[in-house]
Amino acid sequence: MKENNKESQITEGSKSLDEVNGSIQVPDNAGFWRTLAAYTGPGVLIAVGYMDPGNWITSIAGGAQFKYKLLSVVMISSLIAMLLQSMAAKLGIVTGKDLAQLTREHTSKWGGIVLWVITELAIMATDIAEIIGSAIAIKLLFNIPLIVGIIITAADVLILLLLMRLGFRKIEAIVATLVVVILAVFLYEVALAQPNIKQMFEGYVPTKEIITNKSMLYLTLGIVGATVMPHDLFLGSSISQTRAVDRQNEKALAKAIKFTTIDSNIQLTIAFVVNSLLLVLGAALFFGTDSTLGRFVDLFNSLNNPQIVGAIASPMLSMLFAVALLSSGQSSTITGTLAGQIIMEGFINLHMPMWAQRLLTRLISVTPVLAFAIYYHGNEAKIEDLLTFSQVFLSVALPFAVVPLVIFTSDKKLMGKFANHAWVKWSAWTASAVLIALNIYLILQTLGVVK
């Protein structure tokens, strides 16, 4: 393929995640399944962002309050995610640069700095949810003080460094294993809960009540607003480049885009199933009860309370919930740390030793949570309030990732024949406008400006 413009030329040392960029070979003339296996992996790293601890409370509360009616919102959110993530992957494959690098190139010096600060804060907000989820899970499982649990999560970066030395495929395998644990736990718990299958499938059909009922609308906003994570778009545009692809060959590019998109959609379908299971669990166990489900510890305790969930209540059910929460937090912290590196290198071209960079991004995220925990003496309720505020900030940061993504992937000078088709472009703009509008409304509701 001809060079689209001079800016898209790639020099050594400017590659996104340079240590793993193009490190995985893919077969040239293999069959469909062998080729798909070679491209499978990046999608699972993306998918964990759509089932991180920040989504759990909202999904379970949605089921507890409105039974299965909000399953349609989970489905629509997942379809939007599939569209945007496929565009992010395509951007990285075609241009050889990630979303952070391209955004920096197409803005002024000060504009780039402002965008970097906003995006860096979004990474911090993402990590806060994951750190809190992991720390609370550690306390629930091992009765370790919350402050100690938060410090333990700082060691995640050491695990990531080890995995990076073993190869990127090892990271993909570890995260995939954690996702399987999450999926298995909730499949088991939902099976025990015996949901109404007919009502469950009816819940995937959107109803007007979602908009007309203010309480339902608020939870709808929470589910949609917390689904598309800004850092996942940056991450997707980078890790799609871990496969070795000849960018001068249009057929090779087309094949890479095809199989990367299939991988992404398969893994996001799994994330959709997990989020559906969370909502179904809330509906089957807690709908019509007086239980309070505002915090992780409330959910943990409720699963062991026969007065709330009936005969299936057991300590094992609670412990499995905590195991799934820990798996979610750990898998998300791995991908969040990678996204932190992508953003730091892409926006400000800061190249540091890998261990120093990963340690810096982790400390930046751990510090505010640790300070909050110390100030409130490990009070889970106050710390989970911080998680809520982190989700609100992610809503603020979302347009700064989505809008450039749609612009770049629709630019024929940048993307050549792989620029978005008209229907994709307008679908993306419509989805982006809906996401932004819903997030603004959610922010205004959170601040008490609207009711």
Image (cartoon, rainbow, N blue to C red):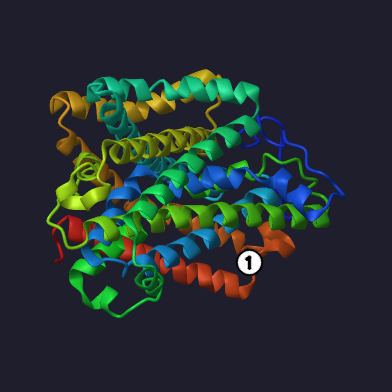
The residue at 40%/59% (across/down) is: 276
Number of callouts in the render?
Answer: 1
Quadrant where the image shows the C terminus: bottom left
Quadrant where the image shows the N terminus: bottom right
The residue at 42%/45% (across/down) is: 115
Looking at the picture, which amino acid does disc 1 mark?
Asn
Find disc 1 in the rendering and name its residue.
420
User: Quadrant of residue 68 in the image?
Assistant: bottom left
Please give left or right for residue 413 compared with residue 98 in the image: right
Residue 221 in view (yes/no): yes
User: Quadrant of residue 113 in the image?
Assistant: top left
143 or 446: nearer the eye? 143
177 or 284: nearer the eye? 284
Question: Farthest bottom residue?
Answer: 208
Question: Could you tell me residue 78's position as x and y percent?
Answer: 46, 61
Question: Could you tell me residue 313's position as x and y percent?
Answer: 25, 45
